[in-house]
Image (spheres, helix red, strand yellow):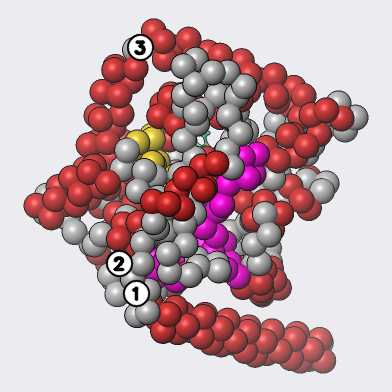
């Protein structure tokens, strides 16, 4: 009996030493990569010259109709990928469009984000040299307009997506809680409920990864996420964003958003077909009472203001587009998506991670659990649809790899996460 206990103890000690060692290695690597960022920053001042814009747009193959019949698609795009807002589904659309038209992506190097949560610097872009020009930037970053403008053509269209702050908060809390030490000391059956009932007891602005717990949208846009909703700086920041972004999508009206995107970018219906990516299994979603929803709104007051503002501008855009026209277009999009679903997806819908047969379609999972759903590509798929189906179903990490991005740091973290915290 004591021999078994001793063995168990040794195994646990080994595991502990291993995780401490690996954590230190990860932190060291992270610090080293960040250090090189800072050094490069000072030397970069140039912006993307107009002459390069012409070169970049020449690559685009537009439909074989005369210019009077169709305007050419817009190809210079800044997509600010906010967290937990359906942004991975948009990313997949952008990857496919960029690949199809051989556009130049500004990608991160070694990982799938631009050193988030550090503020974005143009030197974080893979192979960036001052004066370089890119068509699309779309990976997670902490937004900084001046830095982004250095390598995007002046006519780039700025787009982002928001989500109801309560649902976003719920999603973020459940997805990241193991990566946020502040939550580790929350006792009780439902950590989220405990937190919302008394957020000030658990929250500290300086704590590691605390931004995942409060006004995450505000943080992603590069603002202070600890401002209260009624602070005048909140409205000032929102107005700043409204002058910078050409189109703000809303996750709750995803299909309407895509129709506005298609209209803004002069794209085709085919360009915006999609499958919902990065969704959680239903049992991982916490149901909140109206009282708790009110508390979550109050807690995320800055994000709530942001959402309200752009929800209003969104519906003004829909109005200008035409309600009836929008209805017809959404109907068409849903029909085309349903057709693609029937062509591409085995058993007609998403499945749990452990039931995904091909690792190319296995989505990235949060620390310590496998709650993110994915898909199996249909067996005996019509060969003419195989390529498009596979692309539509490929998660972010695998797609980035296919596009030639090195992801060594992300993969190392993934291996560490699964070895130490695997469920
Ligand atoms: N088409 C569409 N419409 C509405 N909602 C959608 C859509 N696609 C993805 N989702 C939901 O978005 C959540 C994932 O967001 P992200 O992909 O931005 O997450 S991430 O930050 O990149 O990890 C995730 O929310 P939760 O399931 O609540 O976590 C997805 O279910």
Any mark on residue 203, and which?
A: 2
Q: Nearer the viewer, mark 1 or mark 2?
A: 1
At horizontal 70% and vertical 24% (from top left) the residue drawn is: 340
SS at circle 3: helix
Is 224 inside the magenta-drawn segment? no
**How many badges with numbers are in the image?**
3
Q: Sequence-wise, which precedes: disc 1 or disc 3? A: 1
SS at circle 1: loop
Q: Is residue 403 above or below residue 269?
A: below
Q: Is residue 336 visible?
A: yes
Spot occupied by residue 310 in the image (x, y as percentages of width and height): 27, 36
Rendering quarter of residue 199: bottom left
For mark 2, does the 10 Å Cα neighbourhood hold few (<14), some (14 to 19), or many (20 or more) residues? some
At horizontal 33% and vertical 71% (from top left) the residue drawn is: 45
Q: Which residue is mark 1?
A: 207
Q: Nearer the viewer, mark 3 or mark 2?
A: 3
SS at circle 2: loop
Q: CA distance from mark 1 to mark 2?
A: 8 Å
For mark 1, does the 10 Å Cα neighbourhood hold few (<14), some (14 to 19), or many (20 or more) residues? few
Q: Is residue 332 above or below residue 54?
A: above
Q: Nearer the viewer, mark 1 or mark 3?
A: 3
Q: CA distance from mark 3 to mark 2?
A: 43 Å
Q: Which residue is mark 3?
A: 323
């Amino acid at each position: 009996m004591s021999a078994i206990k001793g063995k168990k103890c040794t195994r646990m000690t080994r595991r502990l030493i291993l995780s401490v060692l690996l954590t230190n290695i990860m932190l060291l690597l992270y610090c080293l990569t960040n250090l090189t960022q800072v050094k490069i920053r000072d030397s970069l001042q140039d912006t993307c010259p107009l002459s390069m814009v012409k070169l970049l747009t020449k690559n685009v193959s537009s439909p074989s109709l005369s210019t009077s019949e169709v305007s050419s698609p817009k190809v210079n795009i800044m997509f600010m990928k906010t967290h937990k807002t359906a942004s991975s589904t948009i990313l997949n659309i952008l990857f496919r469009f960029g690949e199809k038209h051989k556009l130049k992506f500004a990608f991160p190097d070694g990982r799938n984000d631009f050193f988030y949560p550090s503020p974005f610097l143009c030197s974080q872009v893979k192979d960036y040299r001052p004066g370089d020009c890119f068509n699309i930037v779309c990976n997670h970053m902490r937004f900084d307009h001046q830095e982004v403008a250095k390598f995007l053509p002046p006519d780039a269209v700025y787009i982002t997506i928001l989500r109801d702050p309560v649902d976003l908060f719920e999603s973020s809390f459940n997805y990241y809680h193991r990566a946020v030490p502040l939550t580790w000391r929350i006792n009780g059956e439902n950590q989220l409920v405990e937190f919302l009932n008394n957020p000030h007891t658990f929250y500290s602005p300086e704590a590691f990864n605390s931004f995942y717990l409060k006004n995450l949208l505000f943080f992603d846009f590069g603002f202070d996420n600890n401002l209260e909703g009624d602070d005048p700086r909140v409205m000032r920041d929102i107005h700043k964003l409204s002058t910078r972004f050409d189109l703000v999508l809303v996750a709750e009206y995803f299909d309407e958003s895509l129709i506005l995107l298609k209209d803004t970018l002069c794209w085709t219906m085919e360009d915006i077909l999609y499958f919902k990516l990065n969704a959680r299994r239903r049992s991982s979603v916490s149901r909140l009472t109206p009282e708790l929803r009110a508390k979550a709104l109050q807690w995320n007051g800055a994000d709530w203001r942001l959402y309200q503002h752009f929800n209003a501008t969104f519906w003004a855009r829909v109005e200008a587009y035409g309600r009836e026209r929008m209805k017809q277009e959404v109907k068409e999009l849903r029909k085309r998506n349903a057709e693609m679903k029937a062509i591409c997806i085995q058993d007609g819908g998403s499945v749990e991670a452990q039931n995904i047969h091909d690792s190319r379609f296995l989505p990235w999972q949060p620390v310590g659990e496998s709650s993110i759903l994915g898909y199996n590509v249909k067996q005996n798929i019509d060969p003419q649809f195989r390529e498009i189906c596979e692309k539509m179903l490929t998660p972010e990490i695998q797609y980035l790899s296919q596009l030639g991005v090195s992801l060594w740091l992300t993969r190392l973290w993934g291996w560490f996460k699964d070895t130490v915290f695997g469920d």
